Amino acid sequence: MRLQYLTRIFFLVVFLSSFTIFSNANILVLNGLTHESTGELGTKYKDRIEIQNNGTEERSVRVYLRDYWFSYTGESRHDEPGTLDRSNAAWVNFSPQLLTLQPNEKAFVDFEVSVPQIDSLKGTYWSVIMVEGIVPPDTVASSRGVKINTAIRYAVQIITNIGETGTKDLQFLGLELNNDGTNNLLNVAVENAGECILRPEISLEVFDENGISQGIFKADRRKTLPGTSISTSLVLEGIKPGNYTAILVADCDEDHIYGTNISLEI
């Protein structure tokens, strides 16, 4: 298989949608793993994280702040708060830092974000509040072997957008064509090169050698923060071997859609 692409960028108009992710474990985060708000300079806003002990025993939970960065390669980091240039960790106050929940008990971690009055702040800033179940000590003696205790933790993203400020820019990092044994896949890596959060919807319209459309293939929207990157796969279902041209598009919002012409040899 061989893939070549050109670099013509164009802009369109599109509607932006979003979604929230939920997770399962003995300690549950009930109201989502992303809390995104818009705040003006010098203002404050409050929110809360709702958690529940879904197990049958008493559980303790530790709560703390970290920065968060991720890459399309699968690498991610939870660094000390304030490490990233766009960290808002210093703006976040939360309580409690430690709590104990009885079986089926619910509790809240309340937090307040104080946006500084600094004129140079533009775009999106973020950090994560880590919610981590504390593993109780193993009181059962073992004469041999190794026992592994696993602590479940959640990274709840606290995202602050400074009004309507900041630039938006998206760059295509790479394209890779492969096959999963059933369908051809186009893996697309993009990077947020701007100052604002983006949720690109990646789509590809494929044309045969006669210029007839063979369909439009889409992937779900995914969030990418400034300086981070993501990879998504487009399933080219029903595309037979041959030579094709295509238009690859990344819809970000009403005014920012990025695209490139590519050629495919399958």
Image: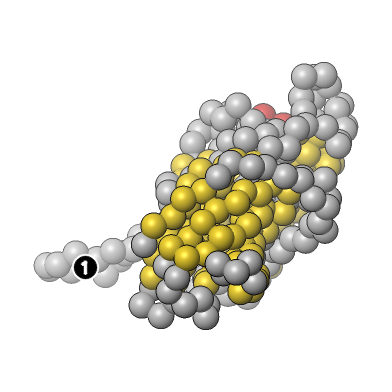
Does residue 40 appear to the left or right of 63 in the view shown?
right
Mark 1: few/some/many CA within 10 Å (<14, 14-19, 20+): few
Residue located beneath label 1 in the image:
141
For the question of whether residue 162 can be seen, the reply is yes
Question: What amino acid type should be assigned to the residue bearing mark 1?
Answer: Ala
Say which quadrant the C terminus sits in.
bottom left
Residue extending furthest front?
Answer: 210
Q: Residue at x 62, y 35 (%)?
A: 193
Residue 190 is situated, as x and y percent measured from the top left of the image, at 56, 47
Q: In what element is the residue under mark 1?
A: loop
Which of 208/25 is in front?
Answer: 208
Q: Considering depth in this image, is 27 or 253 the residue closer to the camera?
A: 253
Residue 99, visible in the rendered structure: no
In this rendering, position of residue 204 left or right of residue 162: left
**Direction from residue 240 to residue 251 in the image, left or right:** right
Quadrant of the image for the N terminus? bottom left
Q: Position of residue 4 (x, y in %)?
A: 46, 50
Q: Residue at x 70, y 33 (%)?
A: 195
Q: Is residue 24 left or right of residue 47?
A: left
Residue sitting farthest toward the top: 119
Q: Position of residue 125 (x, y in %)?
A: 69, 35
Quarter of the image where one finds residue 94: top right
Camera-side residue of 114 and 198: 198
Seen in the picture, residue 149 relative to 36 is either above or below; the reply is: below
Image mark count? 1
Return the residue found at the far left: 144
